[in-house]
Image (spheres, grey):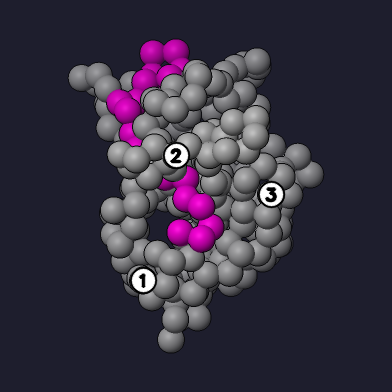
Amino acid sequence: MESSTTDSNYNDPLGEAALAYLAGKRNLKIKVQSNIVEDDVIPVDYLFRQFNEMPVLEQQAILHCRGSVLDIGGGVGSHALELQKKGLDVTMLDVSHGCCLAAKQRGVKKVINDDFYSLTSEQGYDTLLLMMNGIGLAAAIEHLPVFFAQIKRLLKPGGQVILDSSDLRYLYMDEDSYCDLPDEQYYGEVMYTMTFRQHKTIPFEWLFIDSALLAAKAKENGFSFEKMADGYHYDYLARLQLIT
């Protein structure tokens, strides 16, 4: 995300909200605007959920992590903290400076404040974890090769990628389940803006990809695809591994 103002200090709505929450503020909400649905909000306390408050797919993802783990887009560290409890060597990565500060305050031991595509690793990781529609980092279908190339750079031999996403076709269904998808672009490519107080992002792309298309794109880029579980509302959990 880049700043929507001339001051980059005002481009961190998630981080600002997280730090306000840790300072004792409650009933906070982050405003979310997109080009496909009405405005929505993220309750800030949801970012701080415990394991028993997480959706089933998140719980399963955490249970399937192994070895050294990179929690990509780890937010305020809720997943990383659970992985630490399991005794795993976990590093949390997030572009938000405020979220990284919040994660450290909560007890996450290893935190990297950086962009996913800028990250390098000499040793690599056994598990790359991308939750809360984490593959959205790819931004668009045409950018998936860049996403997969970075994944390859960060994975150890025999490593795994655990991610979740959603099939947004339900947004285009009528009461008879007829689906009228747009022709101009893939229906899972969404443009977002987030706002909290004076902090606001410029619009950024986020990708939601159906499981069949992800399986095909993974194979094109040298990965196997395994659907691990279906969620309750067109979402799913998947594992990717390099084809050897």
Q: Name the residue under label 3.
A: 231
CA gap, disc 1 to disc 3? Answer: 26 Å
Residue 200 is drawn in which quadrant? top left
Sooner in the amino-acid sequence: mark 2 or mark 3: 2
Of tags 2 and 3, which is closer to the observer?
2
The span picked out in magenta is 194-213
Viewer-closest of 134 and 101? 134
Q: Is residue 100 above or below residue 134?
A: above
**Residue 48 visible in rendering:** no
Viewer-closest of 35 and 130? 35
Sooner in the amino-acid sequence: mark 1 or mark 3: 1
Quadrant position of the N terminus in the picture: top left
The kind of secondary structure element at disc 2 is loop
Taking the spot 53% from the left edge, 39% from the top edge, the residue there is: 179
Which amino acid, by three-letter code, is at mark 2? Leu
Crowd tier of the residue under label 2, counting other residues whose Cα lies within 10 Å: few below 14, some 14–19, many 20 or above:
some
Residue furthest right as drawn = 52
Would you say residue 201 sits in the magenta stretch?
Answer: yes
Q: Mark 2 points at which residue?
A: 181
Quadrant position of the C terminus in the picture: bottom left
Taking the spot 47% from the left edge, 50% from the top edge, the residue there is: 209
In this rendering, the count of numbered labels is: 3
Viewer-closest of 138 and 188? 188
Sooner in the amino-acid sequence: mark 1 or mark 2: 2
Q: Name the residue under label 1.
A: 220
Would you say residue 199 sits in the magenta stretch?
Answer: yes
